[in-house]
Image (cartoon, rainbow, N blue to C red):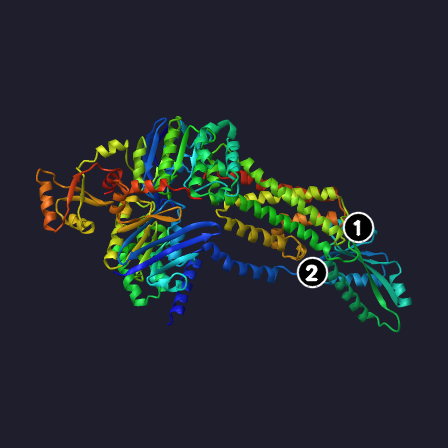
Amino acid sequence: MPASSSQLLTFIRKEFAHVLRDRKTLLILFGLPIVQIIIFGFALTNEVKNASILAVDYARDEVSSEIISKLKASKYFDVETTSSSHLDILSGFQAGSAKLAVVFPENFASDLRHFNSAALQVITDGSDPNTANTLTNYVRSIVIDYQSENFTTHGNASGIRAEVRMLYNPQLKGAHNFVPGVMALVLMLICVMMTAVSIVREKELGTMEVLLVSPFKPELVILSKAIPYLILSLVNVASILFLSVFVLELPVKGSVALLFAESTLFIFTSLALGLFISVRAQTQQTAMLISLLGMLLPTLLFSGFMFPIENMPKALQIISNVVPARWYYTIVKAIMIKGLGIGALWKETLILGGMGMFFLVVSLKNFKIRLA
Amino acid sequence: METVIKTERLSKHFGNFIAVNEITFNVERGEIFGFLGANGAGKTTAMRMLIGLSKPTSGAASIAGFDVYRQTEQIKRNIGYMSQRFSLYEDLTVMENIRFFGGIYGLREKMLKAKGEKIVNELGLASERNKLVASIPLGWKQKLAFSVAVLHDPKIVFLDEPTGGVDPLTRRQFWDLIYARTLEGMTVFITTHYMDEAEYCNRLSIMVDGRINALGSPSELRQQYAASSMDEVFFKLAREARRTDN
Amino acid sequence: MVTVNGISKSFYDGKVQAVKSVSFDVRSGELFGVIGPDGAGKTTLFRMLTTLLLPDGGSASVLEFDIVKDYRKIRRHAGYMPGRFSLYQDLTVEENLNFFATLFGTSIAENYHLIRDIYIQIEPFKTRRAGKLSGGMKQKLALCCALIHQPRVLFLDEPTTGVDPVSRKEFWEMLKRLKEQGITILVSTPYMDEATRCDRIALMQYGEILAVDTPASIINKYPETLYAVKSAEIPRLLSDLRQYDNTLRCFSFGEHLHLSLRKEDGNALDELQEYLYGRDHRNVSITDTTPTIEDCFIRLLK
């Protein structure tokens, strides 16, 4: 064998030894693809199932009730029939308990019979444009189905028209979805990873040793590390909002002050999470890996940013409740797009705050005052 | 007598800073040559030029007959090097390290096996051969690192402070290993901060502020500087230094 | 000042015993050296005394404070310089010093007199980032940072490792001047020749203390007579002496060999000369010599 290829073999053998002996890396190399396949393959889907929708039936004739039963029978929808007013729709959308409303006007059937054309109002929650689109298309296809089974359109009659109105996001801008998502992601990443890495770096470099042999109070050191990132992150929030309002033309419907306050709360929770990680990690590399895999991935997958939470199997929905970004994402969307106030958001705010306190308390308790 | 290391006015500049200033010295085959100097005197920079890791700014040098400007690959193939900072892979076993470095030097399987056996037996590591290097004591590590550095029987071996922090017994055992090799004709180029080890060298040079200010055998230098020990020689020279490792 | 009573520490679930039941005392104002090679357990010992690690067994107190229960008090009054450079590389000299002064609730101005002799040497570089300092200067800065809060006891873990002999000498001179100010200093070092600069020393290897005493006493306790032997061919001399049946111990020590004999009756030296002459050694010189700490260490190791 020529010298260079046997040298290559020697190197390869050595590299294998390094890799196989590093248990943690092995876990990631083999564990991660498996987890990803399971999650992406089975659990996450853009497909909508059992979406909660409202049917407001002013017509109460045989056409409307047939269409409603078809909607009920469809696996895509979970229909709640209300016969009262638009106000129900608004509150349902605000609470996030309904994603779409189908409204049958009073003379629906008779219009159809006499004019061969009737309008069906479809109102969707535009704050989630992807889902809104998908649901609307489902409704349309069910309506078309019904039409073709029962009527034939002749001439210029257009049959049942679905008039679609988007609440909160009339132009169906994608920005509505990804600006809050980006905010959650960016804040989380910076606060969690940077805090964790910064504290662990002291351990790795040895400055922690010298700090410990001094009258230093852990709380002070932690606070001093958190504050620069807090300020930096608020600046980030401001710049993202600025760009979103003036460049992407996505205005903030609700209170900007509330948005900043909630952002501060989320930053606090992320910093506490970063601290939590730093207590356990021994090297900067570990801290970064845990931050990325343990925080970035779940945030992307479970915050509701990319995949609607309602469409996930129960088990994953429960997991998503533990991801702080999920709550922040809901809050931001509610404020920016739906214009809601603290009254509607106190539950989410409390949860977010509670998580932050939990991480903080546990980390402070476990903060190592010794090297081992 | 074959001259295995030849340098003539070898220099290295970093911008305006002259790290190595026209050093000239030779080393003969089979010699133990000590390369001394305070931290910052330019030892490390000079050594890197000799082993082909850094290109000189001016001057000439040849190692085992190969030119340091144009033939660095041949130089690397004909020398052994034991660095202070790294020598063996801690997460590989004793045998795996031997096999790896042997493979790199191009040793054939049978030869590798034979040498590996010889090394572990000589060092008394036979029962530890499958233990991770991380778990064997420092003294053994250093001796093993040396044996690995000379696995391919190079003409010259460059040792950069190989006995730092090691206990006195192991230090002497290390030197026994060095002596054994020089008897077989290997040339040893060593830097050290232990002045008693300076005495074990056939000849040595002391660098001050980038220049070689002393060159000769230990007894010659002691006479020249009217000193009773190498310690004293070193102090007298270092006191002249203006550059305090900056 | 410092009392150590049989403390031990092991790692990896007991597989590695770093410190095995170590006991010694350090008196107030002493310059105490822990002398031993890498891996002897010096750093682990120091980390326990500075309250960074908990001992597995035994007890110890620093300044009358227990290292386990009263660690906070120790941390306020001890100065610590760990083995490798542990200051903030991206802060300047001045910023580092300021930081540590503030950490201990004092200021550079308040305690400048303590560090003046040392700081003067690095003051010209006070706006340089610590990471860009040379090894010797980093050492001096670390020492200043350990001193700035006027500690009553100073722990220096291998402050001179990897440093050339001249810088080492200078460093010990700095330590002597510090001692004169009444600070108790514990230093660990692998360099045997530094032992004589201490008031008292503890020789340490494999986690155990081999001896604790003043350097002079340890040297005095060397039982056999030590001879410095030389000839024209040292390597051959070494192997010949090792084969000699009256040799107890023979090791190289620079330009001489240090030899102790098993039996030292009146004829011993003559018989030795004869043996060496018979082995064709020329210019043989055999002189009495005072043992060094290194001789004592080697003897204790065997």
Residue in the picture at 87% in, 62% down: A108
Q: Which residue appears at 71% of the width and 55% of the height?
A: A177
> Do labels 2 and 1 touch, CB within 8 Å?
no
Say whether residue C231 is left or right of residue C42.
left
Read off the chain for label 2. Answer: A
Residue B180 coordinates in the image, percent (x, y): 24, 55
Front-most of C292 and A340? C292
Q: Nearer the viewer, residue B49 or B141?
A: B49
Q: Residue at x 30, y 44 (%)?
A: B195
Q: Which sits earlier in the primary sequence, circle 2 or circle 1? A: 2
Amino acid type, mark 1: Leu
Q: Tell which of B72 and A186 is nearer to you.
A: B72
- The answer to whether residue A56 is seen in the rendering is yes
Q: Residue at x 55, y 45 (%)?
A: A196
Could you say where residue B92 lies in the image, as x and y percent from the top left? 38, 56
Q: Secondary structure at mark 2?
A: loop
Q: Residue furthest right?
A: A114
What is the number of the mark on residue A48?
A: 2
> In which image quadrant can residue A43 be found?
bottom right
Q: Chain of mark 1?
A: A
Q: Which mark is residue A90?
A: 1
Q: Quadrant of the N terminus of chain B?
A: bottom left
Local packing at callout 1 (Cα closer than 10 Å; few below 14, some 14-19, many 20+) is some
**Between marks 2 and 1, how big is the CA–CA gap?**
21 Å
Identify which amino acid the numbered label 2 is placed on: Val
Q: Measured from the top left, where is residue C206 in percent x and y?
A: 31, 42
Left or right, residue C264 beside residue B84: left
